[in-house]
Image (cartoon, rainbow, N blue to C red):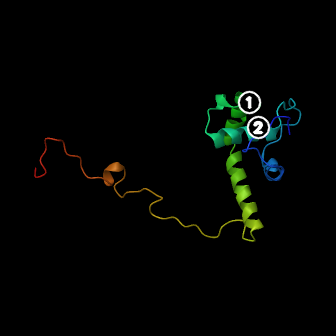
Amino acid sequence: MSSRRSYPSDLSDAEWALLEPLIPAPKPGGRPAKVPRREIVNAILYVLENGIKWRAMPHDLPHWSTVYHYFRKWQKEGIWEKAVQALARQDREREGRQASPSALVMDSQSVKTTEKGGPEGTTGRKRSRGESARS
């Protein structure tokens, strides 16, 4: 880890040990990475946990444009989704459960649908101010 002070959003060594295999390593034969992957992930977590703009990142973290570049790149490559799924599987296995759930529950409030399609199917016709209720 770098010599900077730690933030509450920083990954612990145990958390990084779980996440590190899921984060793409620098490509072999390419330029050596200037910023360690762990620092990039820590900076991403800082932004997400504190709800700040990328450009408002503290100066002791990697430059915001580097961090944002990797965040978007990994998002487009599906790395975050794969990481969440892998960590959920590991968590379930640690609890002695099957890696993948055997059932899914979805209630009707979670899915918006209508037989007619579109918003017109769920709301009544709008009346103008001048139109009477009896017309």
Label 2 crowd (10 A; few <14 / some 14-19 / many >=20): many
At x 81% / y 48%, what residue is drawn? 20
Quadrant for residue 58, please give it: top right
Q: Secondary structure at mark 2?
A: helix
User: In the image, residue 46 lies at what x, y percent?
Assistant: 69, 40
Position of residue 45 relative to residue 60, above or below, is below
At x 65% / y 43%, what residue is drawn? 49
At x 82% / y 33%, what residue is drawn? 35
Q: Quadrant of the N terminus?
A: top right
Labelled pair 2, 1 in contact (Cβ < 8 Å): yes
Q: Secondary structure at mark 1?
A: helix
Q: Which mark is residue 66?
A: 1
Amino acid type at mark 2: Ile
User: In the image, residue 6 lies at what x, y percent?
Assistant: 78, 40
In the drawing, does residue 21 fall left or right of residue 82?
Answer: right
Label 1 crowd (10 A; few <14 / some 14-19 / many >=20): few
User: In the image, residue 48 lies at what x, y percent?
Assistant: 65, 41
Position of residue 107 relative to residue 47, above or below, is below
Answer with mark 2 or mark 1, whichever residue precedes in sequence. Answer: 2
